[in-house]
Image (cartoon, helix red, strand yellow):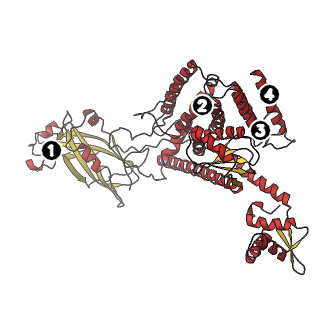
Amino acid sequence: MNLKVNKISDAEAEIMRVVWEHPGPVTYSYIRTVLTQQKNWESPTVNTLVKRLVKKGALIQEKREVYYYTAVISEEEFTKAKTESFLQKVYGGSVKGLMSALITSGNLTSEDLAELHALWEEEGKNHE
Amino acid sequence: MNNLFTLCLSLSLSGTLLAFALVLLRPILRQFSKRWNYYIWLLVLMRMLLPFGPQIKGEPILQSVGQNPLTEAAGLSPLKYGNGFSISDPGGPMSAVSLSSMLESHIFSAAWLAFALLLLLRKLYLYGQAASAIRSQSKEAAEGPLPTVLQKVKAAMGIKRSITVCTNSFIKAPLLTGLVRPTMVLPAQVYSNTELEYIFMHELTHYRRGDLFYKWLVEITLCLHWFNPMVYWIRKQVSRHCELSCDEAVISRFDSDRRKSYGNVLLDAAGSGIENKRDRLALSLNEDGKLLAERLRAISHYKQASKSVRFLTLTLTVVLLCAAIAAGMATGCSLKEDGQSAPMQSAAPAAETMVLERVTMERYEGEDGHPYVHDVRTNNTKKTIIRVQCGMLAFDKEGNPLKIDWRSTDSQSDKTYLCLSEDTLIEILPGETFDEFGGWSLNIFGTDANVAKIAYVLYCDKEIECKDGSLWKNPDFENWRTSYEGKKINVKLLENYYPYVQAVAF
C-alpha cells in the first residue's frame, strides 16, 4: 500500500482509533467530540490531525451533507505494518549485532525450537 | 592522502594473515576459554587499525616505501617524497607515468575514504533509527519485580551505574541498549524471579565488559576495511564469542542444576520470539539456531580450564603478539619517516631536471696556465636555458671545507667558502648536454695556496632562466647551503655527489 504506516504519529493514531472503533464512516464532529471529551484536545488540533491523515492517505474523505471519514487500513493491518517496520529497523541485519540481546532469535521457527529442545534434553541426559 | 590507502591495504593484509593463523589454530584454541577466544580478536582488530611496530629504515622485507604486493597488483607506483617534487607536464612520456600514478593513488585514497565514511554514517543512522524505534515502544518499569531484581543483581555484581529497565511489546528477546544511557529492555510478559536474575546477569555482564564498545570497534574496522571479506567473517566470530564468553562468565560459579536452569531460560526466551513460518526450506538450523545450539552445548559441557591449558594460553598469546608485529613488518605497516638519503637529492621519478653530470678541477696548459673548475650539465627540460646562477663549494681530499679566492681578487679578505657564479653567455637547448671547454677560473694570480688542495667542488644551481623568460628558483638552495657551507663532509658523499639531479619546474 502507498500509505506509510511509519509516518503516522501517535497523535494521529488516536484519530485512527476513533475511526476504527466506530462501525462505518464517521463524521468530523463525532471524532472531535470523542477526543475533546476523552483527551481534552482542542478543536483546531483535531482539525489539523484529520486533515493530515487525509493528506497522508490514511483516511478517505467523503462529502455527503457533511464530511464523512473512513480508514483506509484496518487496525490489524496497521499494527502488523507497524510491527514489521519495527522489526525491520531493530532486527533488520545491519544493526542487529549492535545491541546486546540475550539471544538472537530473529529467524527461529517452531521446528528449530523443537530441535533445540531435543538437543538440550540430550545434553541433560548425558550429564547425569 | 597518498599513503593512507596503501597503509590501509597493508594493515588489512597483515590483519588477515593473523586471522588465518587463528583459523588454522582452531583445534587448539577450542581448548581455551571462551573469554580468551573473544578477546584475541582484539589483537587482529588492533593490527588492522593501528600502524604499530618497529620502524624499518630502508626497505621492509617485501617492499619499498609506499608499495607492497597489493598496491603493485593494483597498478600503483611508489611515491617518494623528496624535496622540490615537481608537478610534471602531462605531455612528456616519462612524466605521464608519474602524473597518472599520483592521480590514481589520490583517487583510490579518496574513493576508499569516502566510501568508508559513507558506511559509517549509514550505520550510525540505522542504529539511531533502531534505538529510537525501541525507545518509542518501551515503557519504563519503575516498580515491581523488574527493578527490584535488577537492583539485587546489580548489587551482587558491584555495578553502581543507574540502569533503567523497560518492557516493550515489540521486541523478541531481552536486550541491552544505549552506550550513554544503558537501558535494559524486556519483552512484555510474565517472568519468574529466577528468569529475571539470569537475564539481568547476562545483560549486565555485557554491560560491565563494555561489549557494546567492542562491537562498535568491529563495525568501525568494517567501515575502513569494507573491501576485505575476511573482516565480515571476523565480525561473526567476535559476535559468536561475545555470547559464548558471556554465558561462560555467568555460569562460571554455577553448579549443574543452575546451569540447567540457565539453559532453560535461554530456550524460553527463544520460544517467545519465534515466527511460525512453515514455508522455510532449510533442513537444518539457521545462523541463530546454530549459535543457540552451540551455546547450549557449551553450557552443559562447561568446565574450568586446567593449569596446563592456562599456561598454553599465555604462551600462545605471546606468540600471536609477536606474529602480529611480524605480519606488520612483512607488509610494511609502520608509518615511515622520510628516508635517510643524502639531504638535497630531489629525486622525482621522471620530471624536468637539470643534471650536473660532473665537476672537475682542470688546468689550462702552458706556462701561465691557471686552474679552473669545469662543469658538465644536461638540460632535461623542454626549454632553452640561457642563464644559470650557481653556488660552488670546495673541499680538500679529507672533506674539509676550503675558503677560496673564487674571484681572483687577490685579496685575503675575499676568500669565502661559497661562490655564487652566474653564467649568461650560454644557450643550452632542451635535452642538450653542455660540455664546453673551459669553466670557472680560479686563482689567476696564483696566490691562493688553498686552490692546490681542492679535491672536490660541489655545485648547486640557485636560479635558472630560460629563453622565453621563465624562471626557476631552487627552493632547496638554502638547505644545500646550510648543509654544506663551511662544514666537513664525508668523503664518500663527496665522491658520490655527481651526477647531481635537480628537479626543475618553471
Q: Confirm whether circles 2 and 1 share one chain.
A: yes
**Disc 3: which residue:** B268
Name the residue at 40% across, 40% down: B337
Q: Confirm whether circles 2 and 4 share one chain.
A: no
Kind of residue sitting beneath label 1: Ile
Q: In this rendering, is residue B127 above or below A24?
A: above
- Say if mark 1 contacts mark 4, CB within 8 Å: no
Q: Between label 2 and label 4, give the one nearer the viewer.
A: 4
- Say if mark 2 contacts mark 4, CB within 8 Å: no
**Disc 1: which residue:** B404
Q: Is any atom of residue B341 visible in this view? A: yes
Residue B380 pos. (x, y %): 39, 48
Q: Between label 1 and label 3, give the one nearer the viewer.
A: 3
Q: CA distance from mark 2 to mark 4?
A: 26 Å
Q: Mark 1 or mark 3: which comes first in sequence?
A: 3
Q: Looking at the rendered structure, which numbered label has been put on residue A121?
A: 4
Disc 4 chain ID: A
Disc 3 chain ID: B
Q: Is any atom of residue A103 visible in this view? A: no
Kind of residue sitting beneath label 2: Arg
Q: CA distance from mark 4 to mark 3?
A: 14 Å
Kind of element beneath mark 4? helix
Kind of element beneath mark 2? helix
- Say if mark 4 contacts mark 3, CB within 8 Å: no
Q: Between label 1 and label 4, give the one nearer the viewer.
A: 4
Q: Judge from the rendering whether residue B343 lies leftward or rightward of residue B293; answer left or right.
A: left
Dot 2: within a 10 Å radius of its alpha carbon, few (fewer than 14), some, or many (20 or more) residues? Answer: some
- Say if mark 1 contacts mark 3, CB within 8 Å: no
